């Protein structure tokens, strides 16, 4: 699995300033990778370009061994005419039923499956939305703030469970939580607001897995590296 | 909702009648120009029953015409929702035809088809069809990205699901448009009857007009207002019930 960009540029139609300016990076192998940086630097734009079939075949974006790329974001909604449990059942194939049950347990959503989407809290809405993506066939799942509004402890449990259950998949995690991306991601692409040529860096993260022992010194170094690149 | 509609109409009707009578008193006009309260009451006693049946006759044509135009507007709106050439063609055609006063075509319809049921139905449905079509086209052509994204990227999107999502998300708008189009259908039928039909309240108003009998016209307007208020109230209540049934679960209420 490989995701690479070579001197990628992107400007929205009608704008004069480029959102993505001369971006180059390489990410390899399955696991959690992160896009990190302040708002408006082009993280979501890059994610949408990677997921879009229009850009996938271009010379600027190279993708190897990843046929299905899904992009999920935190403002998505489920239709309101039926309960969330019914919606989940409808989008889950029979061979993924056991994974579904497992995920519902881990994501702590068992009690809300009978409720409509609009009756859930924002954190519950984001979790139910993420589950339905995890139950699809994919090679790369882009999670654009998909765990926003979820408490820190549960977020950690969810990330560790996803890493364990989907160890052969690649995840591109967009988050504004420095500690989280440093701890759980293997590679962190840090965007900075700059007009210089070099406006991004890839930093190695701690890539903690279930039952991890945290090396606080190494984590501090990673966080400092990210902050310096910021 | 039903009673609110009736109260609203009664208030508007009373204000309008009071205004007429103020003019009558202010300018010392005779009962021939503006009938007094007793003359209107006497006329009501004479024609009320007949007018109730006339209004029901008109309403039945309006309801049929409205149902026809709803079915047609949904069919065309759903087919024209895509940004393909056929979709653009339907949208442009609908916008252009909407700009033309359809009621002006009524004489042609009566000349070609004569008096009777079909021309009245045709005029009623034509008058409420285009405003309905534009609203339905607008709703059906606007994606609900936050919901549709998942189904598109996972290849699960079908046209039926797309229509269901857009209709559900715009249920209030659709209910308002449909109940609003009831007035248009009624207006269309009355105008059709007024021009050349041989039945309905529009036909009775035409006779009253030839007799210069404002009292009859005031009674007819009262009957039309009450019955259309009841019909619109029923439509709104139905819309509200569908919305509640569709969107609120048994476990709790939507906040």
Image (spheres, coloured by chain):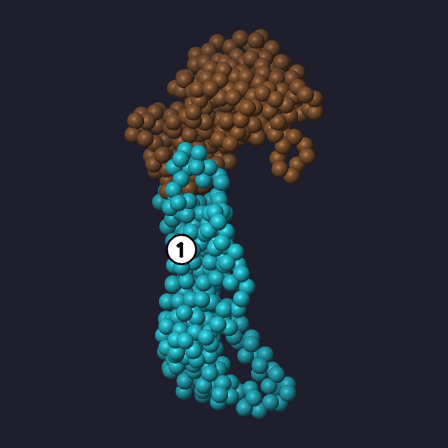
Chain colours: A brown, B cyan
Could you tell me which residue is drawn at 43 percent across and 12 percent down?
A211
Q: Can residue A88 be seen from the camera position used here? A: yes
Categorize mark 1 by other alpha carbons within 10 Å: few (<14), some (14-19), many (20+). Answer: some
Could you tell me which residue is drawn at 29 percent across and 30 percent down?
A94
Q: Can residue B223 be seen from the camera position used here? A: no
Q: Chain of mark 1?
A: B
Residue B62 horizontal side relative to residue B213, left or right: left
x, y (%) of residue A202?
Answer: 58, 16
Which residue is the site of mark 1? B75
Could you tell me which residue is drawn at 39 percent across and 45 percent down?
B159
x, y (%) of residue B17?
Answer: 54, 79
x, y (%) of residue A80?
Answer: 41, 43
* Residue lying farthest to the right in this orientation: A195
Could you tell me which residue is drawn at 51 percent across and 63 percent down?
B97
Nearer to us in this view, B45 or A25:
A25
Nearer to us in this view, B138 or B227:
B138
Nearer to us in this view, A161 or A152:
A161
A42, above or below B205, in the image: above
x, y (%) of residue B113?
Answer: 39, 75
Could you tell me which quadrant the N terminus of chain B lies in? bottom left
Secondary structure at badge 1 equals: helix
């Amino acid at each position: 699995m490989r995701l690479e960009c070579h001197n990628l540029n992107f400007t929205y139609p009608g704008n004069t300033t480029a959102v993505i300016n001369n971006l180059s990076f390489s990410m390899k192998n399955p696991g959690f990778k992160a896009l990190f940086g302040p708002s408006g630097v082009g993280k979501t734009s890059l994610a949408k370009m990677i997921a879009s079939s229009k850009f996938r075949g271009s010379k600027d974006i190279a993708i190897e061994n990843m046929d299905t790329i899904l992009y999920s974001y935190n403002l998505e909604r489920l239709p309101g005419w039926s309960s969330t449990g019914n919606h989940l059942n409808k989008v889950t194939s029979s061979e993924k039923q056991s994974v579904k049950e497992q995920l519902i347990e881990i994501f702590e959503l068992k009690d809300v499956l009978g409720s409509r989407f609009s009756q859930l809290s924002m954190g519950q809405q984001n979790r139910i939305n993420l589950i339905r993506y995890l139950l699809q066939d994919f090679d790369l799942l882009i999670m654009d703030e998909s765990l926003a509004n979820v408490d820190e402890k549960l977020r950690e449990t969810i990330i560790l469970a996803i890493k364990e259950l989907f160890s052969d998949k690649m995840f591109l995690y967009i988050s504004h939580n420095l500690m989280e991306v440093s701890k759980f991601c293997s590679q962190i692409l840090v965007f900075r607001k700059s007009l210089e040529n070099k406006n991004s860096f890839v930093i190695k993260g701690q890539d903690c897995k279930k039952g991890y022992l945290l090396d606080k010194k190494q984590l501090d170094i990673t966080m400092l590296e990210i902050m310096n690149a910021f | 909702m039903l009673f609110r509609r009736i109260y609203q109409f009664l208030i508007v009707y009373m204000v309008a009648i009071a205004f007429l009578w103020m003019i009558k008193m202010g300018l010392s006009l005779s009962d021939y120009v503006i009938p007094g309260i007793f003359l209107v009451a006497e006329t009501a006693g004479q024609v009320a029953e007949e007018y109730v049946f006339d209004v029901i006759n008109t309403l039945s044509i309006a309801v049929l015409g409205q149902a026809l135009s709803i079915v047609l507007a949904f069919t065309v709106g759903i087919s024209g929702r895509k940004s393909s050439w056929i979709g653009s063609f339907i949208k442009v055609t609908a916008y252009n035809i909407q700009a033309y006063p359809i009621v002006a075509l009524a004489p042609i319809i009566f000349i070609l088809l004569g008096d009777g049921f079909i021309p009245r139905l045709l005029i009623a449905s034509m008058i409420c069809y285009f405003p309905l079509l534009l609203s339905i086209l607008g709703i059906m052509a606007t994606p609900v990205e936050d919901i549709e994204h998942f189904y598109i990227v996972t290849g699960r999107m079908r046209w039926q699901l797309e229509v269901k999502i857009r209709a559900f998300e715009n249920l209030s708008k659709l209910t308002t448009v449909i109940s609003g189009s009831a007035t248009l259908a009624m207006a269309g039928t009355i105008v059709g009857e007024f021009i050349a039909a041989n039945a309905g309240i529009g036909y009775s108003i035409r006779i009253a007009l030839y007799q210069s009998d404002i009292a009859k016209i005031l009674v007819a307007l009262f009957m039309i207002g009450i019955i259309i208020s009841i019909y619109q109230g029923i439509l709104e209540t139905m819309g509200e019930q569908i919305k509640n049934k569709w969107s609120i679960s048994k476990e709790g209420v939507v906040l």
